[in-house]
Image: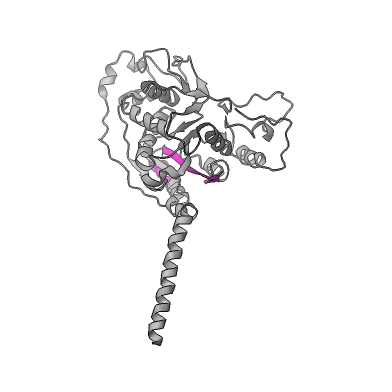
Amino acid sequence: MMMTRRIEFLLTVALCLVLFLLLTRQLLPDAILGRERQYAVSRRPPYLGPPCFRNTSVANVTGFSDLPERLHNFMYYRHCKYFPMLLDLPDKCGGEAESSGVFLLLVIKSPPENFDRRVILRETWAKERQHKGLWIRRVFISGTTGADLEKRRMNKLLEVEHRQHGDVLQWDFQESFINLTLKQVLFLEWLDDRCPRVRFLLNGDDDIFAHTDNMVEYLQDVHGEPGGDKHLFVGSLMEGTGPVRELNKYFVPVQVQESDSYPAYCSGGGYLLSGHTARVLHNMSRSVPLHPIDDAYMGMCLAQAGLRPSGHMGVNPSGLRIPSSKVDPHDPCYYKDVLMVHRFMPQQLYVLWDQVHDPGLRCWSNSTWP
């Protein structure tokens, strides 16, 4: 009899323990299980593509030999939209079914050598957290830098960050300004496979100040909850522009684009888009040829889908216009209501993020962005 009671007691304790674990799983999926998912990292590519071969026929294009070498390489491999993935995050958003729980995914373009920027961003505006009960998640997207020993060292750095923070995506292509478009296309492919139901995304550089709290509130106010199922592409609107024909960083020759005009687009320093629009861009990128200017390319994909970007006065790719040279251009009162501003050094971002969240901050104006 005593043995029977002891067995019944042990079974009761075991049942209570199971119920407690199940209840905890339901109540704390992000606080506990979400953190486990964050560090579920992989080096296996999520998709496979055909090998990329050099298109030597472009060498016969008139004027090809007069172009800079970087454009030679671009034209040789322009048709290539697949490169092997070195670092993957298959469970970053909790899988296809749970990815709708990510309200804002921060997609930050960051080459391997920008370690100091990533360190600061993880502790400031790109910190993974909940705001107003909505989840903000983070990924850094990167290619490779250098060759041989330098490339191996930089790759090892990203591997360590990938393992410790669960926030690095890397593909095996050479980092360069002209390859930013390729990086965007590869990310859109990854997003469609790994995080297809994310609500909204911030796509930006690693030297912007992004007031991600303000972004969540703006997206809530304008698009409601859960949101993300309608077109949204908003930033610093560029209209009536075209390819730069002078030989500089932004040079686009007629051999790459004959037209002298671009569709409307948003400056690539940073812009917000919905998950719906990200899926549209992914579909359009399959047929729109790569272009050396990544933000203009996004405009081309939008135009192909019959969509337009929008402007927002809270997005400032060239910095804020400070009223006087006698005042501090990094006064937090100028930044407490913005969405994003370009450009900042890491130490400036670190201080500014702390200042705009100071509950004792008092400013002469309490205006907000519409």
Q: On the picture, is 279 further left or further right than 318?
A: left
Residue that protrudes farthest toward the bottom in the picture: 1
| Colouring scheme applied when the structure was drawn | one colour
Residue toward you, 367 or 323? 367
Q: Is residue 147 magenta?
A: yes
Residue that protrudes farthest toward the front in the picture: 1
Say if 328 sits above or below 150 in the image. above
Residue toward you, 118 or 155? 118
From the image, which quarter does the N terminus lie in?
Answer: bottom left
Q: On the picture, is 196 further left or further right than 118?
A: left
Residue at 40% x, 48% y is: 94
Say if 260 sits above or below 323 in the image. above
Residue at 39% x, 80% y is: 7
Residue toward you, 293 or 320? 320
- The location of residue 74, given as percent across then percent down, is 35, 25
Q: Quadrant of residue 277?
A: top left
Q: Is residue 172 magenta?
A: no
Residue toward you, 155 or 42? 42
**Can see residue 331?**
no
Say if 123 sits above or below 269 in the image. below
- The location of residue 133, given as percent across then percent down, is 54, 46
**Can see residue 202?**
yes
Report the span colored magenta: 129-153
Q: On the picture, is 13 further left or further right than 346?
A: left
- The location of residue 330, given as percent across then percent down, is 67, 33
Say if 12 sits above or below 19 in the image. below
